[in-house]
């Protein structure tokens, strides 16, 4: 009976984690392409900016907090009873995806659109937007797609084993810079084909997080990998890739 319940918990988490992840990615792409004018928020203009700023801030704050020592404890308690430690990676991705959904669909649009893509230049903008997404997907792959998508959690539970987080990522795009995922996320924001006041607010705010946030991640890497990470840090740039040696 316990084995059956474990399998059910793993499969339910798989559906929840990857379902929310797919919805979040799709929503982010659609809303950025439209200059963040798709949100369902309908607050008055004064309150709208306060609410939008709160939506902007909740993602980086909670996303980083859940990776702290105390935050990891919260993750384990949020997962199904008895499986919190194993399902923590899946729970983390599910929460992050839900945060993105809240940001884009509760956003109150300003209606102030500065530029909408059209013609050949518009096609080029969409091509750049697609290229930024491909860069982000490549960075996620190089870091370990199972970890970044949350699959390692529910898959480990399904097999009755502990989650395997993988080693320090140093291959692929990680040879060019230490934080290609955050770089790819920033590129997706800045290459959005429609420009608006809403887009600029979100892009500037989350770009600051993309530049500053990984510093805390690297403190964890140094604590885990020690001299290996320090050697890697000494030879590979932090955020912007080195185009030639």
Image (spheres, rainbow, N blue to C red):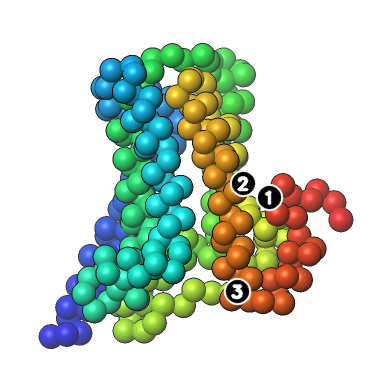
Labels 3 and 1: the sequence-earlier one: 3
Question: Residue 46's x, y, as percent?
Answer: 34, 18
- Mark 2 packing: few (<14 Cα in 10 Å), some, or many (20+)? some
Residue 95 in view (yes/no): yes
Q: In the structure shown, which secondary structural element does the residue marked by tag 3 occupy?
A: helix
> Against 117, is 59 above or below?
below
The image shows residue 104, relative to residue 109, as above or below, that is below
> Which quadrant does the C terminus fall into?
bottom right
At mark 1, the secondary structure is loop
Instruction: From this view, report whether residue 44 is shown above or below residue 11.
Output: above
| Residue 28 in the image, given as x and y percentages of width and height | 42, 38
Q: Which residue is mark 1?
A: 239
| Residue at mark 2 to residue at mark 3: CA–CA distance | 20 Å
Secondary structure, mark 2, is: helix
| Residue with the most extreme right position | 245
Q: Residue at x 49, y 74 (%)?
A: 165
Q: CA distance from mark 3 to mark 1?
A: 20 Å
Along the line of sight, which residue is nearer the eye, 75 or 27? Answer: 75
Q: Which residue is mark 2?
A: 211
Whether tag 2 and tag 1 are in contact, CB under 8 A, the answer is: yes
| Residue position marked by numbered label 3 in the rendering | 223
Residue at coordinates 26% horizontally, 65% vertically from top-left? 78
Q: Quadrant of residue 207?
A: top right
Q: Position of residue 121 (x, y in %)?
A: 62, 19
Which image quadrant: the N terminus? bottom left
Q: Nearer the viewer, residue 36 or 85?
A: 85
Left or right side of 105 for 69: right
């Amino acid at each position: 009976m316990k084995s059956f319940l474990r399998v059910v918990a793993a499969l339910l988490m798989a559906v929840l984690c990857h379902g929310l992840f797919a919805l979040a990615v799709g929503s982010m792409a659609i809303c950025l392409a439209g200059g963040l004018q798709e949100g369902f928020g309908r607050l008055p203009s004064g309150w709208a900016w306060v609410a939008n700023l709160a939506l902007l801030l909740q993602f980086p704050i909670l996303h980083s907090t859940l990776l702290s020592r105390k935050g990891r404890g919260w993750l384990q308690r949020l997962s199904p009873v008895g499986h919190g430690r194993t399902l923590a990676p899946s729970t983390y991705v599910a929460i992050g995806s839900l945060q993105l959904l809240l940001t884009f669909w509760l956003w109150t649009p300003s209606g102030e659109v500065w530029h909408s893509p059209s013609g050949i230049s518009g096609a080029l903008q969409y091509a750049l937007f697609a290229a930024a997404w491909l860069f982000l997907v490549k960075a996620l792959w190089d870091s370990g797609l199972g970890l970044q998508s949350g699959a390692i959690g529910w898959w480990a539970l399904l097999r009755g084993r502990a989650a395997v987080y993988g080693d320090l990522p140093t291959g692929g795009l990680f040879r060019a810079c230490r934080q290609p995922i955050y770089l790819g996320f920033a590129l997706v924001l800045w290459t959005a084909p429609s420009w608006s006041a809403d887009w600029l607010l979100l892009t500037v705010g989350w770009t600051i997080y993309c530049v500053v946030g990984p510093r805390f991640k690297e403190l964890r890497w140094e604590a885990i990998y020690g001299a290996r990470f320090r050697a890697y840090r000494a030879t590979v740039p932090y955020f912007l890739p080195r185009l030639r040696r």
